[in-house]
Image (cartoon, grey):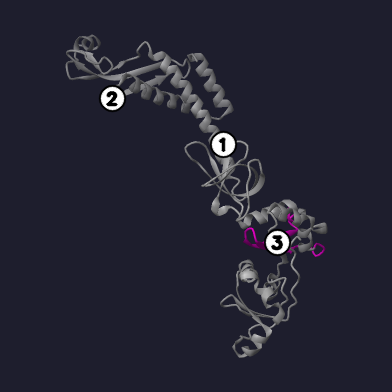
Amino acid sequence: MDSNELILAMKQIEKERNIKAEVLIDAIEAALVSAYKRNYNVNTNVRATMDPDTGAIGIFASKSVVEHVENPNSEISVAEAKKINPLYDVGDVLEVEAFPKDFGRIAAQTAKQVVIQRIREAEQGAIFDEFAEKEGEILTAIVQRVEKAGVFVEFGKTDGIIPFNEVIQGETYNPGDRIKAYVLKAQRNNKAPQVLISRTHPGLIKRLFELEVPEIQAGVVQIKSVAREAGQRTKVAVVSFDPNVDAVGACVGPKGIRVERIVSELHNEKIDIIEWDPDIAVYIAKALSPARVLMVYINEAEEAAKVIVPDNQISLAIGKEGQNARLAAKLTGWKIDIKSKSVADEEMGLVPETFDAEIEGEPAHDGE
């Protein structure tokens, strides 16, 4: 690459990659100084210049004035120094142009490497900016390999990783598998931008419903809350702003096709869709679906609720290992204490009477 080619290349890069020529020239000059010092074992001050119009390169080195030159790259004889200025004497330091004959090839190679590196950095910067803007979004990734650090995936121009704490337990990944994942953040490393993604984040559920349900995309139906135990069960609370649109029905879809697609993407994770209600007692009762609720007593000051269910519904309300109750509490943001009717009757004197409402729970939709 001669000087003219280098100037033309820089102008093209400035136009296409939006990297200013001044930035490239500064980088080339710094690289030339480093190359000169490395190749000629010089530790003195060195500076490089590059003409932005012609591409001509100059190397200027500080040299010590000595009687007898041992290292011509860092020393100059007093006789030669006096030719430059008669006032120079032994011990003085002066700056002279120093461009060894064989440095031309090194300079050209160095300039080319810097230009290539800056192009790569610009491309990586653009990729990082692109994915930084996608934080909180959903992307389709292709599985590349599974290692100790996590599952490595590819998005086309860059790579991503699902750390093992963001992997759904029991889910298997094979090279070539296409999966949808939630973007946690983009980060830089020494090689290229890397995107951290998740298969367990509740946001993945929200984004999947946004993809599948036109009413959510249109703003007619809104997801109010999501509570998830990834790979096992999720509860989603939805509300409709149009009295003619059933929020739960819209999310379930005709013959359950919409929720079934999401369940399939999550490898049969159960999904309960319930209707959000501004009345917290009603909302809590629905959140405990599929269990039937008889009564809800609320304590607004502590955001706690005592829920009464029929004796034959207590196991269903609590769920296996407490999962249904736990998810209902996450979904509503309230503490929930569940009692069977027979136990509640015995403790009636202990139950606060701040709220009293009979509520029928609605069956949950699990996409099955």
Q: Which residue type carries mark 1?
A: Ala
Give the residue number, with chain letter if any, for mark 3.
271
In front of the other: label 2 or label 3?
Answer: 3
Figure quadrant of residue 96: top left
Q: Is residue 238 magenta?
A: yes
Pointer 2 or 3: first along the chain: 2
Residue interval drawn in magenta: 216-245
Q: Is residue 324 among what the camera can see?
A: yes
Q: Nearer the viewer, mark 1 or mark 3?
A: 3
- The residue positioned 57% from the left and 53% from the top of the image is 166
Q: Earlier in the sequence, mark 1 or mark 2?
A: 2
| First in residue order: circle 1 vs circle 3 | 1
Is residue 198 covered in magenta? no
| Tag 1 secondary structure | helix
* Most foreground residue, 151 or 301: 151
Find disc 1 in the rendering and name its residue: 126
Q: Nearer the viewer, mark 1 or mark 2?
A: 2
At which x and y percent is residue 169? 60, 56
Residue at screen point 25% across, 11% down = 84
Describe residue 52's horizontal placement relative to residue 276 as left or right: left
C-alpha span from label 1 to label 2: 37 Å
- The answer to whether residue 164 is above or below residue 306 is above
In which quarter of the view is residue 206 placed?
bottom right
Q: Which residue is mark 2?
A: 43
